[in-house]
Image: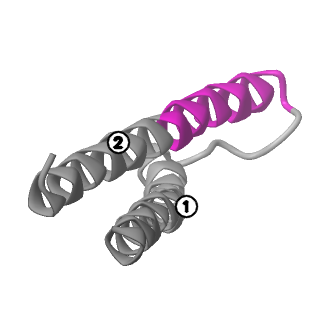
Amino acid sequence: MSTRGLLVRWAAIAVLVWNGIFDLYVSRGAREYLQMAAEAELGRGSTPSMGDVMAWTNRRGAAAATGWAALVFGAGCVTLFLRKKSA
């Protein structure tokens, strides 16, 4: 397989990793909001703002997802470099 084809595959894998990690953080944020809302109904805290909780979750999720995707894509680029060097 050509180097370009392998690079495209690594990029696609990095995109899938980004989407998976981001989705994980967003689902955790939704669960966290529901937990906070339930605690507020029981009088154990203040009423949360869904916009605030999800904005914070989105920022954190995007940062984590970008880091992991960059790591995966970087590892792919290293493997392509080593492949080309050994050939």
**Element under disc 2:** helix
Amino acid type indicated by mark 1: Ala
> Which residue, given by chain and number where applicable, does mark 1 sit on?
64
Looking at the rendering, in which quadrant would you find the C terminus? Answer: bottom left
Which segment is the magenta one?
24-43
Mark 2 / mark 1, whichever is N-terminal: 2
Q: Where's residue 39, x and y in %?
A: 79, 28
84 relative position to 6: left or right: right
37 relative position to 63: left or right: right
Q: Residue at x 32, y 71 (%)?
A: 84
> Which residue, given by chain and number where applicable, does mark 2 sit on?
19
Picture quadrant where residue 45 is located: top right
In three-dimensional space, the C-alpha distance between marks 2 and 1, rounded to whole angstroms, equals 11 Å
Q: Where's residue 43, x and y in %?
A: 84, 30
The residue at the far right in this view is 44
Seen from the viewer's position, the closer of residues 34 and 24 is 24
Seen from the viewer's position, the closer of residues 84 and 40 is 84
Picture quadrant where residue 47 is located: top right
Circle 1: is it few (<14), some (14-19), or many (20+) Cα within 10 Å?
A: some
Seen from the viewer's position, the closer of residues 18 and 53 is 18
